[in-house]
Each structure stands twice: as C-alpha cells, then as structure tokens.
Image (cartoon, rainbow, N blue to C red):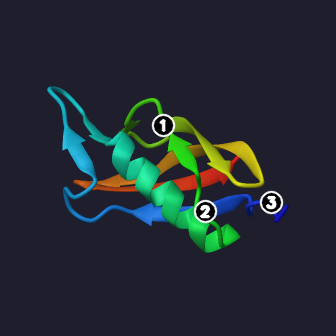
Amino acid sequence: MNARIARTIGTLAAAGGLLLGLSACSMSVSSDDVKSEITRVVQEQLQTSPNSVDCPSGLDATVGATLTCHVVIPERSFDVVAKVTAVEGSDVRFDINEV
C-alpha cells in the first residue's frame, strides 16, 4: 500500500481529564495518549496498523502547541504533527497532519 494519509488525518476531542495529565503549572496530553490517537487514525485512514509511533513528549494543552511524532508502517515511515486547536477547561482538541 502506497496511499498517502489525507492532509488532516484526524481530530481528537479529549473527554474530561481522560487525556490530560496535570503538571505543576500546566496541563498536557500524555505522550501515550497522543500515540494512541495517532495509531487509531492511521488504522482508520490507511487500513494498516503502525509498527511503531514515537512521540518524544506530551502535547502542551495550549492552542497552537505542536508535537511531531514519527510513524512507521510496513510500507514506509513518516512524521505527523499534532496541533492543539482548542482547549475548553479540561477538554483538548487537536488535529493530526502528515508532514
């Protein structure tokens, strides 16, 4: 399969505090939760499971914050950027785009 992921491969609406981890002064979506959402979207869009998804850190819960993660699927590897589009209380929404 050589299909390219659609420019926007997914949007996440985090429920309550489920995907938010609080640190001393700020909120963030954990690296594991970002990886899980990327995995879900890749499976849905490309009909294949990633061999690996590597995100170096969590995603700050600040509108405009970004996190680049590396994805490996059987046919190729590529980077995706998760970008926070909205924060409402403890709900965080972000888009995932292939770069």
Q: Nearer the viewer, residue 72 or 61?
A: 72
Tell me the quarter of the image containing the C terminus.
top right
User: Mark 2 or mark 3: which comes first in sequence?
Assistant: 3
Q: Residue reaching furthest right?
A: 2
* x and y percentages locating residue 97 in the rendered image: 65, 52
User: Mark 3 or mark 1: which comes first in sequence?
Assistant: 3
Which residue type does callout 2 highlight?
Val
* x and y percentages locating residue 62 in the rendered image: 38, 39
Check the image and report above or below for 42 versus 90. Answer: below
Which residue type does callout 1 highlight?
Cys
Q: What residue is shown with label 2?
A: 42
Secondary structure found at label 2: helix
The residue that appears at 42% across and 56% down in the rendered structure is 36
User: Can residue 61 be seen at all in this image of the molecule?
Assistant: no
Check the image and report above or below for 58 versus 76. Answer: above
Q: What residue is shown with label 3?
A: 4
Which residue type does callout 3 highlight?
Arg
Q: What residue is shown with label 1?
A: 55
Q: Crowding near pointer 1: few (<14 within 10 Å), some, many (20+)?
A: many
In space, the residues marked 2 and 3 are separated at their CA atoms by: 10 Å
